[in-house]
């Protein structure tokens, strides 16, 4: 009996594979043959060219958008005989341009990241570290809560029926609107510093994690669950040996969404309580004083932070799935 | 069918009602300060009494949401169709699109406010940026989702590119497009409300939330949040309803056996 069940278990994936569309199958095989890296290399050239095109568009846009402003400046300063070249150079080096040119943002990043001491309030490293702390703390709380809730929902029937629709419905609500209020409420309890912002980050990252993990823990197919039953596996065993490993791809996918959401939460929370610093506070300060270069620099730093965090989780995903024997 | 959907609705409805009742009793029983958490009944009264203000806020915010949503999603689908024929552009744009989807795009809000002014146009611009990339990525995936067999069939019919696109590939892409449309309803609401934190004429849901928090009239904040939540759910519901009407042939609806 046991052998029969094991054979069935083995046949499961193969049976399914026979019904997979030929194209998907070919994709799987080519991935197994280690073409994944090759495909990524193939993307390098197109991505480079598209990025280069974007930079050109950016420069043209900066010229077009800044010209009226610069003309006014020249007129106010009484400069009349300027050539088109003078105008273009002035356009791309304004102090408060409508659209700063890329090299201005790079210069600002260079100044605020490398040349300013990281302890100074003018340093983007200082603000970035604050945002990073809030994001990581919030993400840790949020994903732990999300996973715990997913485990509950998968195991307790009553909760599945009553809780899951609310988790889904909550996705349709602009949760971020709550951010200013959560900061105020926590202030009443004398909770200040990074914790209120981490709570908002947690709040945002927690829903994608719950939804993804419920899907992941449910992903083993009935054949595999039946097999566990024929083994007389307890619930805990089924969970540890089948459900948890099967949810790994979903786990990493939801972690990626969760950490990106946590960063958004942290940045928005900083906008609503800007005196503690952080990238969101830099955004707000820049928008108060019309410092466009500062806004763009803060924005790019936040983007780099987000991309790095997501990339790190992607790396962990690749390592773990290789260890688990998923061909990638 | 009716009995079944009622049975499906009962547990979450009971759960929601239970939460409200517990909330009311906890707030009244333990004397939770008003600033921290007002009782649901207080919020409801406030909501009823300030309908004119809330309605004005709603109109202001929804303009930006709808305009941005339509432009952003429309542009996403159009660009997807445009780059669909070029492998090169797809390879160049899609990784960027995936990257941008993970970025904190709400951060462009101050820039858009600077470019397009305080009124709803700047909010629409933020929403366009937020909704464009999810739609682009989904629509490109959707356009390539038609199976090889169906494509071959179109070829044997001698269908040209336009016919294949209209008759086979766009309909096959619809479930993907609707998926992005649904995700984008939430993103559009978030984008518009957060953009209002950065500056608006003195009306709008985001403005209301940030000013009333400053004035400590938390019941008004909650009333605005109720309106925002209802709007978001309704928006999502309408899109989901259209989806059901338009992609009734898709497996996820067929199997339910209505």
Image (cartoon, coloured by chain):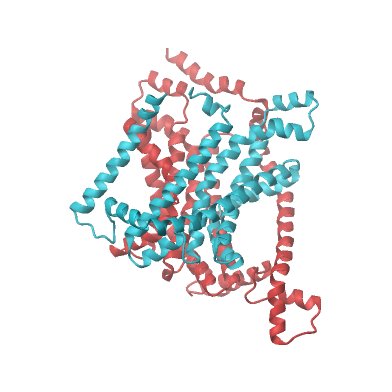
Chain colours: A red, B cyan
Comparing A77 with A264, the one in front is A77
Question: Compared to A74, does A224 lie above or below?
Answer: above
Please name the residue shown 48% across and 52% down the image.
A261
Comparing B176 with A108, the one in front is B176
Residue furthest to the front in view is: B52
Question: Compared to B141, does A231 lie above or below?
Answer: above
Quarter residue B170 falls in: top right
Where is residue A324? Give x, y as percent: 51, 35
Number of numbered discs overlaid on the protein picture: 0
Residue furthest to the left in view is: B29
Please name the residue shown 49% across and 45% down the image.
B235
Please name the residue shown 33% across and 60% down the image.
B218
Quarter of the N terminus of chain B within the rendering? top left
Where is residue A313? Give x, y as percent: 52, 48
Where is residue B213? Give x, y as percent: 37, 64
Question: Compared to A180, does A86 lie above or below?
Answer: below
Question: Compared to A125, does A206 lie above or below?
Answer: above
Please name the residue shown 64% across and 51% down the image.
B96
In the image: residue A99, left or right of residue A200: right
Q: Is residue A93 visible?
A: no
Q: Is residue A245 visible?
A: yes
Quarter residue A29 falls in: top right
Comparing A41 with A270, the one in front is A270
In the image: residue A206, left or right of residue A29: left
Where is residue A152? Give x, y as percent: 34, 37
């Amino acid at each position: 009996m046991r052998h029969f069940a094991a054979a069935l278990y083995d046949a499961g994936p193969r049976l399914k594979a026979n019904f997979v569309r030929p194209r998907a199958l070919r994709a799987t095989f080519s991935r197994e043959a280690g073409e994944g890296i090759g495909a990524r290399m193939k993307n390098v050239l197109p991505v480079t060219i598209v990025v280069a095109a974007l930079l050109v568009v950016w420069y043209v846009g900066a010229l077009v958008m800044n010209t009226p402003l610069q003309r006014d400046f020249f007129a106010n300063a009484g400069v009349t005989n300027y050539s088109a070249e003078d105008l273009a150079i002035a356009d791309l080096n304004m102090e408060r341009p409508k659209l700063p040119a890329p090299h201005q943002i790079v210069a600002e990043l260079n100044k605020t990241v490398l040349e300013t001491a990281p302890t100074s309030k003018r340093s983007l490293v200082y603000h970035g570290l604050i945002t990073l702390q809030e994001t990581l703390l919030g993400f840790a709380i949020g994903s732990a809560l999300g996973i715990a809730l997913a485990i509950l929902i998968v195991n307790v029937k009553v909760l599945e029926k009553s809780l899951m629709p609310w988790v889904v419905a909550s996705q349709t609500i602009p949760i971020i609107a709550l951010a200013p209020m959560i900061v105020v409420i926590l202030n009443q309890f004398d909770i200040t510093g990074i914790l209120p912002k981490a709570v908002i980050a947690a709040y945002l990252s927690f829903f994608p994690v719950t939804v993804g993990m419920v899907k992941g823990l449910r992903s083993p197919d009935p054949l595999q669950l039946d097999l566990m039953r024929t083994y007389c596996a307890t619930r805990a065993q089924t969970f540890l040996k089948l459900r948890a490993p099967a949810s790994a791809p979903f786990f990493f996918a939801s972690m990626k969404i969760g950490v990106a959401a946590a960063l958004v939460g942290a940045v928005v929370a900083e906008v609503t309580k800007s005196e503690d610093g952080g990238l969101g506070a830099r955004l707000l300060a820049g928008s108060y004083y019309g410092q466009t270069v500062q806004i763009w620099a803060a924005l790019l730093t936040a983007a780099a932070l987000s991309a790095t965090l997501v990339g790190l989780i992607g790396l962990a995903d690749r390592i773990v799935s290789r260890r688990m024997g998923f061909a990638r | 069918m009716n009995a079944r959907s009622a049975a499906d609705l009962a547990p979450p409805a009971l759960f929601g009602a239970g939460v409200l009742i517990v909330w009311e009793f906890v707030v009244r029983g333990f004397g939770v300060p008003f600033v921290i958490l007002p009782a649901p009944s207080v919020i409801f009264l406030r909501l009823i009494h300030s309908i004119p203000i809330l309605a004005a806020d709603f109109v202001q915010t929804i303009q930006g949401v709808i305009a941005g949503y339509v432009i952003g999603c429309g542009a996403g689908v159009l660009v997807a169709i445009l780059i669909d024929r070029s492998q090169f552009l797809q390879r160049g744009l899609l990784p960027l699109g995936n990257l941008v989807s993970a970025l904190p795009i709400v951060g462009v809000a101050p820039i858009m406010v600077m470019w397009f002014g305080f009124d709803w146009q700047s909010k629409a611009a933020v929403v366009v940026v937020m909704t464009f990339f999810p739609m682009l990525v989904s629509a490109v995936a959707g356009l390539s989702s038609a199976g090889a067999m169906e494509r071959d069939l179109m070829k044997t019919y001698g269908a040209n590119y336009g016919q294949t696109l209209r008759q086979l590939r766009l309909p096959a892409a619809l479930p993907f497009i609707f998926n992005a449309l649904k995700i984008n309803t939430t993103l559009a609401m978030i984008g518009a409300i957060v953009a209002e934190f950065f500056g608006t004429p003195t009306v709008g849901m985001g403005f209301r939330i940030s000013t009333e928090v400053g004035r400590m009239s938390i019941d008004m904040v909650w009333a605005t949040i109720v309106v925002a939540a209802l709007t978001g759910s309704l928006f999502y519901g309408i899109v989901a309803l259209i989806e059901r009407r338009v992609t009734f042939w898709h497996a996820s609806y067929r199997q339910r056996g209505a």
